[in-house]
Image: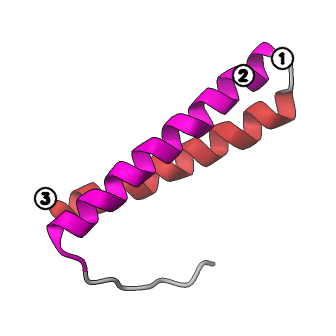
Amino acid sequence: MSKTITLVLSEDEAEIIVDALETDFEGYNDAAKDARANGARADVATFTEAATRITAVKDKVRAAIG
């Protein structure tokens, strides 16, 4: 199991994290599309999983902002 950490952030700082995660998500989503087009199934799975995990973290941060 992963270790849990606690961060104290301002809303502005949390928004910066959300923006960075959105950019990261877009990169992995695009990489998954490219891998799909090239028939690289293992890469599709890897990039899709990364995008899904990024979305989960982004949703947690957004929920904390309110």
Left or right: residue 20 versus residue 10 is right
- Report the quarter where the C terminus lies: bottom left
The numbered dot on residue 66 is 3
Mark 2 nearby-residue class (10 Å; few <14, some 14–19, many ≥20)? some
Question: Of the residues shown, which amino acid type is indicated by label 2?
Answer: Asp
Q: Which residues are magenta?
A: 9-37
Image vertical order of residue 47 relative to residue 38, above or below: below
Q: Distance of mark 2 from mark 3, alpha carbons?
A: 35 Å
64 magenta-colored: no
Left or right: residue 46 versus residue 19 is right
The x and y percentages for residue 40 are: 86, 26
Residue identifier under label 1: 38
Q: Are marks 1 and 3 in contact (CB under 8 Å)?
A: no
Disc 3 is placed on an element classified as: loop
Q: Nearer the viewer, residue 1 or 12?
A: 12
Q: Distance of mark 2 from mark 1, alpha carbons?
A: 6 Å
Please, which colouring scheme is shown? secondary structure
Image vertical order of residue 28 relative to residue 2, above or below: above
| Residue at left offset 65%, top offset 44% | 49
Q: Main secondary structure of the magenta part?
A: helix
Residue identifier under label 2: 34
Q: Of discs 1 and 3, which sits in the foreground?
A: 1
Whichever of labels 2 and 3 marks the residue nearer the N terminus, that label is: 2
Whichever of labels 1 and 3 marks the residue nearer the N terminus, that label is: 1
Residue 37 visible:
yes
Mark 3 nearby-residue class (10 Å; few <14, some 14–19, many ≥20)? few
Question: Of the residues shown, which amino acid type is indicated by label 1?
Answer: Asn
Question: Of the residues shown, which amino acid type is indicated by label 3?
Answer: Gly
The x and y percentages for residue 42 are: 85, 35
Q: Are marks 2 and 1 in contact (CB under 8 Å)?
A: yes
Which quarter of the figure has residue 3?
Answer: bottom right
